[in-house]
Amino acid sequence: MDPEAPARLTLVDKLTKFSCVLSRCQAADLPSHSKRLKLSTLPAGLSVTARFLDGPENEVPPGVRRRAYAVLSDALKHHTITPERAGLAHASTTILRGVVDPDRSVRIGAGSALAALIGLYAAEGPDAWKHTEPLFSQFHEILDGNKIPVKETLLVTAGLIGKTKNLEILGQVLCFLIAQLANPNSVLRGTTCMQIIAVAEHHKKSVMAVMLPYFDQIAPFLVLRMCTSPELLFEACRIMHLSPEDFISTTLPRTLPQIFAACEVKVIDAIGKALNAKPSTLLLNHSADILAHLFLLRGPGQTENALACLLNVLMDSANQKSIDIHSVVKSSIVQLIAQLVIVMGDENPEIASSAIPALRKVAREMLPGQPSPDLASFVKTYMLGVVSYVNEMLRDGRGKISVVMKRRILRSLGPMVHLIGPSISTVAPQIMATFQTMIGIPELSEVTLQSWHIFLSTPTPQDIGPHVGPTSAAFVSSWSTFSPVGRVLANKCMEYIVINIGAHLESYLDEVIDLSPIPELDRVRKRLKQLRASWSPKQELQKILDRVWSDNLTVAIQSLGELKNLMLKERKDFVCGLASGDMFDPLVGQILAALFAAAYREGDGTDALRLLAFECIGALGAVDPDRFEIGGSGPPMIMLTNFTNEDDSMAFALHLIQDLLVGAFRSTSDIRYQSQLAYCIQELLKFCRFTPALVGTGNNTSVPMKVRNRWNSLPKHVVETAAPLLEGRFAVPPYTTPQDLTHPIYPCHTTYREWIQWWSVHLITRASGNTAQMIFGAFRQAVRNKDVVVAHHLLPHLVLNILISGDETDAQNIRTELLIVLEDQVDPNSRSNEDKKLLSAQVVFTLLDHLNRWVRIVRQESNARKHEHKRSRNAGTNQLEEQLIRVDSILSSIDENLMAKAALKCKAYARSLMNFERQILTLRERALHSNTDNKDLPTYYERLHEIYSHIDQPDGMEGVSTLILSPSLEHQIRQHESTGRWTSAQSCWEVRLQQAPDNLEFHLGLLRCLRNLGHYDTLRTHVRGVLTRNPEWQSALAGFQVESAWMVGAWQDVQDLADRTTAQTSSMVMARVLLAMRSKDATAITSSLSVARSVLGTPITAAGAKGYRRAYEAVLDLHLTHELEIIYNALTSLPGGSQGHSQLRQRTVAQLNTSLSARLDATLPTFRTREPVLSMRRTAFALMSSTHRSRDIGRSWLASAKIARKAGQWQTAYSAMLQAQQSNHQFSFMENAKLVRATAEPLRALQELENSMRLLGLIEDRKDIVDLTEDDDETKKMKAKALVLRARWMNESERFEIPLIFTNFLNATELQPDWESGHFHLGQFHDECYKNLSPADKSSRGMKMNASTVKSYSRAIKYGSKYVYQTVPRLLTIWLDLGENPRVTTQETFKTLNAVVAKIIKEAPWFTAFPQIVSRVGHENDEVYKNLSRLIIRVLEEYPRQALWLFTSVVKSTKSNREQRGKKILDKLTNNPAATRTGVSKLVAECTSMTNQLLNMCDFHVGDETKTLSMQKYFPSLFKLGCSDLIIPLQESLTASLPPTSSSESDHQPFPLNAPTFAEFFDEIEVMRSLAKPRKITIRGSNGQIYCFLGKPKDDLRKDARLMDFNAIINKLLKANSESRRRQLHIRTYGVVTLNEECGFIQWVPNTTPLRPVLMKGYEARRIKSWSSEMNDTFRRIKDASDKDAAEMFQKKILAIFPPVFHEWFIETFPEPSAWLTSRLAYGRTAAVMSMVGFILGLGDRHCENIMLDVNTGDVVHVDFNCLFEKGKTLETPERVPFRLTQNIIDGLGVTGVEGVFRIACEVTMQLLRDNKDLLMSVLDAFIHDPLVEWEDEKRKLEREPSRRNAVKASVDLRMLGKNALNPIERKLKGLYAAGSSKERPAEKEFSTGNLVQMLIFDATGLANLAKMYPGWASWH
């Protein structure tokens, strides 16, 4: 190298870009040097720099030195640090030499290199400060010993370093610069200021903002020097634009600790003077910060000295000498411990380790008597406060803190948990809340996970159990944000939960969510799968649903995701199967309850939950609401005792904690609100006398058992939340009543929220009674929060309390408040917004419902007490009546007309209906007294009609229509639309439009009709015409426009409308989904589906958790959205067109069609519901260019044609059928033929069917043609259907030869041999042919027909369960009847038949006809009996718990043959080794013992005066049997169900799996007062419920038992039929156990009251006597009078005295309007069903004691079926009415009487009974073969009669007596009835169902018939 300086200069210039060249930097990237090779450039740079700097001054001039540092700077900028940090120390030494160079330019160059070096360190992250700290120490040394120019450039260098992004290094720079602000040299001082400002500007912050994060270091430095160097503080404050006083004030928490540590008393005084405050005040305000710092001091005696100084300052300042350190520490103990705990989380292990000694010092100070206190126990005492404090800090509740500080806090939680140990579980919910909040923040997740792992591994598995579910959900939801280290930690946590302690977590492990989305957790997932291996699909679904209900939002969201995956992928078929059949699996109701609750949930972050819920609702589909029940919550809490009873008050407080506060506390993210709720819980826990001893370790006997039991009754999630608050110290500021509060409050506030909050707050101050004030007083602050849930919940209880016992002025103020809200609803000039009006009205209605509920319950209790104490009126009853009067006076003072109108306006339809009906009754009464017509009534009837249309009750509308003589067009439209008569509705709208062509509403009505009729082209034309005249209607008509456009495939129009319309209506969002699918843009599809679900699901959110029916339209929209998605996914995933993929394509399309078919079957079976589904499917298939498109569209059109035909919409059906034909659907001809037949042309229908079948070759006229093509399964089935259809129609036409018909049926079964329907119809045909034979032919040809029937039915049973109730009973009847004929049993045909039955013994569901089978146990044919006994044993083996109760009457029969056979069957059953293994033997023994003991009890003689017996004393053996595995014989436990689909399922359970068993007998047996002395026993079931049974001695209960079986079958039929199911028609049944022919037990029907006392009470209130001598005379004259005269006397002399009063019972018993309406509908429908069934069975003696009313539901329950089979007509005074339909029965039906609800229910029921005539007669068959005792008595009587007349003694066949009794039933089921009521009754003639019902109602209400009834029947009631 040339030694000359110029040469060095030239060379060094060339080397300045050396590092850039080496690293291949891009020119454009020079400033950052980021896009370069990662090289170690520093060694080379150092080497070059050293060579250039080496030499004498003349060879190394300043220019060379400056450029050499530039080369080094460049090398540093390109350098990549190696693990060994090679060259960095050398670099710093070299640079620091340049920093003190005499030449300024060199110093600046060296400073640049220094900045580059520190930049290198800064890239290392948080630990960079450790490497830079030595450099800053050297900076201070340079400043101390160098000249001013050197100092100046060093300050400039510091400013350059301050431009770093590393926050720790920035802090070092600022601290370094701040220290120079007091420099005496003005140049250096000015330079320092400029550099600080430059740094702030670089970071785009003010000086104050840039310094704020470092005040912990800066503030103490400045303030400690305020006495020695005051200018330093002044300059620093000046540059921050802050006054010194403000700076001192804001930094006191940072400065005071260090000042006291340094014992700088002068500084403390100076601060006091500056702030004009006493030092003691400053100290106490910041005592926790100061004390924490002092206790952390580690030097010998430092803490003691500092504390002494603090104490001196405090005593001097406060002038008190009695202050000690203990009291100072105690005053801020929680904050002090919290701050020391936080230190445990410091990154510096040395600092962190100082926390434990500091805590020990605090413990010694607080516990002076203990030299070495247990630190864990000491800290645990303050845990709740500590955790609350750190939580508040983390949420920036105590001012914003840095991320570094938050890390420190989170890190400290781990050591804290470790310190406390397993006891940490007491504050686990709060710690979990912290973790779950912080884990979602990426920069905090790692430290959170560190502490989380310690937290999980410290408590016991049972203590950590409640938190494993939320932990797993938090990890899975945040996994994507975790760093690699974080993922390792999370995996470690999950491994600990599942692998280490999973086996010990028990049910808590069920709460761990699905881990499959996270591949890294695969090992954990596999272990979890092993632990859950025993789960059935139902259990798996149940566990997921349990998690969906979780209060923890993350758990709920993750669980919904899991449910979605289960429904769409993993268990798709299983979930689909749940929603199939006549009644869905109860899980369907549970799924929807969970999904609706999730959709209804409010709060932050619930949008994702809601969207998932909507998606799952769509996936499940618009399932028929009539086929399942959504479980409702229990009855609302009502304080009957008004807080005067301690137990009731405690129960109320627990209810508030459990049902209101805990959920709100766990779900809110508002810290202030959470504290208020915590205070409420804390105060209520105190009220309940709960203490920390309840959760303490060991057996603490200080807690009373009653309190402990109360605590133990709380659910686990409540205990988890409440336990830490037992030691809570939450407080709220005292409440001051506003002085300017005016009444009413409602007009004074503009929003609903303000009104309900202020009214609640005011009422809390007016609560009556100490207890009420104590409970409600805790809520003064909480009710004022933005969330009105608490106020809404408390208000009804507050109002009731004040009305019952409060001040009269307050009661009147409440009345005024209620009235003003109601008046605001109907005020046309109201200034309130709609939200306020609606929500406020709902609150008022809720209050009124609550008051009415209280009135109802109190009235019931009062009546019960009066009944018990008839002679003694006690003070309690008087007080109750006074309270009733007070509440009733308020309720009755509200005008009914105002209530009705307000309710209608607010859509509270039940309430409006109730009030309008009351007014109608009043108007009718007035009209009756004045003998004039009331002109206002039609207006009220129209209102009723409108209300019924709103609540979707077409039956009610039908009833009201009969009252309106001249219905308006509006009325007719409502009527037509509600019943689906859209063509008629269309005509009405067209007439209205002629009257008002510019009325938008009328146009919308017409368009609605066109849409529902499927006339989309007409709809489009109409919309175009309307918009031409009224373009401003565009937005209103857009929905119809876009829908009709996509229906006809006008996609450009759809696109234009979507682009033009911004509104998010249901039609528009659906249109956007279709457009996205048409574009095949995956992103657009996902986005549009998400938006669509959010919009379409909105009504679900508004409907609430139980509003499924109300929101069904929205559910249907989500159903359509899901179907669009699955059709699109299925058809776009089809493989290409190669031959090999053909089968896969067919399989995919077949699966899609199966899924779509199942979804359609599960929907509400109405045209209105199903047509939109089919219509949307056609649109979806049309979008796809699929080869299957035409076929699938054709199938959909056929389905539309079918539902339109069934709905009676012939035109729509015909249009759809034509479309199906256009789509070339092969089997559309069948639907066409059915449509022709439906329009009353059966012969033409058959002709068209046959023509089409000939075209398809299904009817072969030429035998020489052989079809070699192979049909697929679907085609075969359709051909078989066509053959069966033809055969049935041929048979019904009675024009064809039997062999031809038979051939068609037979061909169908050969074509589709495994099709249940084919075999059933063939068997049915054989059976009909047999029944039509003459008696002679039956004994010859009939045998073969019977055999064919049995064969066909046996095959039908084998291949499905659809016709089981038809096939099994009939097969049994044929087989067993033939077996009793000795001439038949020897024939080969019968032997073959017997063999057929023997073959299917193991296959058939015999349990469905087990009572019928048991009745034939005395069968005379040995071969038949052999199979019969095998069959009985089979049922007993499979279902012993149910079958044994049905078989017990055989074993204990009074007939020896039946008894012996019964015992042999049981012996054979128990001797089977398998019976012991399965537990059947034990059950048989228990059942035998139970039967014996129950018989003993029935036969026990009871004295006349005996009222009760002790079971333990008189029947100890029975009492011991109280705990048994036998099921309690309830009717619902003994009723079987069939598989939901038409194919039999091997895993189907026909009986309830969870049927309650015996847990214990109650000791007291109540003896009833009637002649036979029935005995009432009480049983506690295994489910905790109480059941009562009545033992009836000397009573043949077989009649009741068979009638219950008969009614159970009818209930199944009612559930299977869509019309009856929609009306929820049913018969109330109850369990009957026949022990033998003379004794039995009958289930006591709870919550029922006879009709008679209800009516008697009504008449007593009117002072009307139930009987009088005048009535006696009248009935004596009526008996001999003609019908006409009798009717007139009955009308004038009897009915005139007794006005109908029954309607009052509904108002009194069900004062809440929705309950009133529901109960009355239930009453009307159950009365109708039982009236029809009673008529068919010839049920008499329906006096008012035999008709019971359910006081909870309004159901009618009939009891005492002794008078069956027309026995009433043979009484001394024959019964003339078919059923009871007296004036009061009609009065209970409402203002429409028998019209509407009652009549339609009668017609639906009667039609159903007639349609199932054969089945019902088969069920009654048991009466013939196991005759009743009364028939045996009649037989003896008939056999005695000839001997009296000296005639030949005739033999009377018992079976003939039975058949004669059943013959009238069969005739009635055929529609035969002798109309009229006179003695000369005309001959029977067949009536249609409608006419028959009319005749029955006419006869039941005929005055002559009622007059001639036996007076004891009370026909006037």
Image (cartoon, helix red, strand yellow):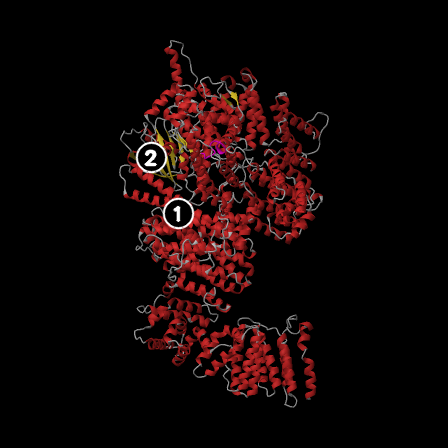
Q: Which residues are magenta?
A: 1789-1798
Which residue corresponds to mark 2?
1518
Which corner quadrant holds the N terminus?
bottom right
Is residue 1440 visible in the rendered structure shown here? no
Task: Check the image and name the residue furthest to the right.
Answer: 1264
Report the side of 457 relative to 1187 (left or right): left
Verify whether residue 1796 appears in magenta: yes
Three-letter code for the amino acid on which mark 2 is drawn: Leu
Q: Secondary structure at mark 1?
A: loop
Which sits in the foreground, 1524 or 1385? 1524
Residue 690 within the segment the image draws in magenta: no
Q: Is residue 61 above or below residue 1721?
A: below
Tell me which corner region of the image, top left, top right, bottom left or bottom right, holds residue 1568. top left
Say left or right for 159 vs 1451: right
413 on left or right of 121: left
Residue under numbered circle 1: 637
The quadrant in which the C terminus is found is: top left
Q: Main secondary structure of the magenta part?
A: loop
Q: Nearer the viewer, residue 1778 or 800?
A: 800
Amino acid bearing label 1: Met
Residue 147 at x, y percent in the picture: 55, 88
Q: Residue furthest top?
A: 1846
